[in-house]
Image: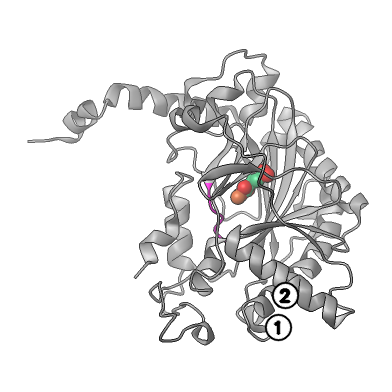
Amino acid sequence: MVTASTKEAQEGGESSYDRKSELKAFDDSNLGVKGLVDAGITKIPRIFINEQNKLDMSSNNPHLSVPIIDLESFDKDAVVRAEIINQIRDACKKWGFFLVINHEIPESVLSEMIDGIRRFHEQDGEAKKEWYTRDYSRKVTYSSNFDLYQASSTNWRDTFACTLAPDPPQPEQLPAVCRDILMEYLKHVRRLGFSLFELLSEALGLHPNHLKNMECAEGILLLGHYYPACPEPELTLGTSSHTDADFITILIQDQMGGLQVLHEDQWVNIPPISGALVINVGDLLQFVSNGNFKSSEHRVLAKNVGPRISVACFFRKIIPVENTTRLYGPIKELLSEDNPPIYRQENFPNEYLMHYDSKGLDGTSSLLRFKL
Ligand SMILES: O=C(O)CCC(=O)C(=O)O
Ligand SMILES: [Fe+2]
C-alpha cells in the first residue's frame, strides 16, 4: 500500500520537508528577499535555486528587437491612427509585446511611481511588516512570491500589490509613502488602458469599443516589484518564465534592464527606454482573440546590482468568484469556417484565474487547459 509518507519518501520527501520549513521560515520573517540582503547574506538560500534557469541563462539574441510604437496623434489624425493600428496588430501577432512612446503619461509621473514603490520597499522593516500577508482578497498587500508554496523555486523579488479598479482604494487604505502617486498614476494608466483597448479592438477588425464593452478594462491590479541585488544571480531568477493572467499589462521598468521575452524560442532583452512603457498581451486576450494575439512567455533575470524596480498594471475583468454561470469564449465576430474556435467556452476568467493562481509561475501556459 502506498501511504502518504511512503509516497513522500519516494519523491524525496525529506528534502521536500526541509524545503517546506525553509519556505515557512522565509515567509514568517515578513521581510522578503530584501530582508535577506539587508541581513548581509553572501549565498542565496536553497529555495531560490532555479535548476531550469542554469540551462538557458546566457541566451539573448541581440539581433532581434521588440517593436517600438509611437502613439503621437493616434487620436487626432486618421492616417496616423490606421498606421498605429497596423503596427499594434503586427506586434501582437508576432511578439505579444511592444513598447510605446508618446503615450501621454508624463515621464515625471512614471519616475515618481517607481520612486513611490522604492519608498514602500525601503521603509523601515517594522512599518512594512504591517502590510505583509498572503490574503490576496485584501486590497493592498506586500509579500514575496504569491506562489511561494506552489512554485518549484522562489523568485528573487518582493512585491507590493494593490487593486486599483473597479473600486479604487480610499487614500487612507494606502501606505502613506506612495499614496499620492498611486492615486495620480491610476488616472493616467486607466486613460491609456482605454485608448489601448480601442486600438486593440480595431487591430482585431472590431468596433473600437468592443473590448471595452466586454469590460476588459474594468479591473486593474497594480504590482510594484522590488528586485534587490543578488549575490549569486546566475543561480536564480527575478521572475521566472510565465505569461500574464490578464487582457493586457502596462509596465513601467526602471533603467536596470533584465526583462526578456521568449520570441521564436529565443530570449530577447526588452531594453529600458526612458519614458517608454512596455505593453504585453495576456492570456485572456489570447483567449478571446482566438489565438490571434499572442500571450508570450517572459521573465526577469536576477542581477548582482540593484535594486531593479518595476510597476505592472494588469487589466482584467473581475467577476465575483461565486458567479459560476457566465460563459466566455473566443469573440464570435472573429470566428468563421476558416477560423474555428480553438478554445472552449469557459466560466472565464474565473476558472482560468483560479487555475493560474493555484498553479503558480511554473513556465506552462494556463490556457492549455481550455484548448479544444
Ligand atoms: O518586473 C518586470 O519587469 C516584469 C514583471 C512581470 O512580468 C509580472 O509582474 O508579470
Ligand atoms: Fe508578467
The range drawn in magenta is: 242-247
Q: Earlier in the sequence, mark 2 or mark 1?
A: 2
Q: Residue at x 83, y 80 (%)?
A: 79
Amino acid type shown at disc 2: Leu
Q: Quadrant of residue 202?
A: bottom right
Q: Residue at x 46, y 45 (%)?
A: 363
Q: Residue at x 62, y 78 (%)?
A: 204
Q: Residue at x 67, y 16 (%)?
A: 39
Q: Are marks 2 and 1 in contact (CB under 8 Å)?
A: yes
- Where is residue 252 drawn, in percent x and y? 76, 49
Helix, strand or loop at mark 2? helix
- Which residue is identified by label 2? 199
- The residue at label 2 has a CB less than 8 Å from ligand 2: no
In the picture provided, is 169 more to the left or to the right than 58? right
Residue 208 image label: 1
Point out the residue furthest to the front here.
Answer: 63
Amino acid type shown at disc 1: Pro
- Where is residue 24 drawn, in percent x and y? 47, 29
Circle 1 residues within 10 Å: few <14, some 14–19, many ≥20: some
Nearer to the camera, 181 or 103: 103
Residue 170 included in the magenta stretch of the image: no
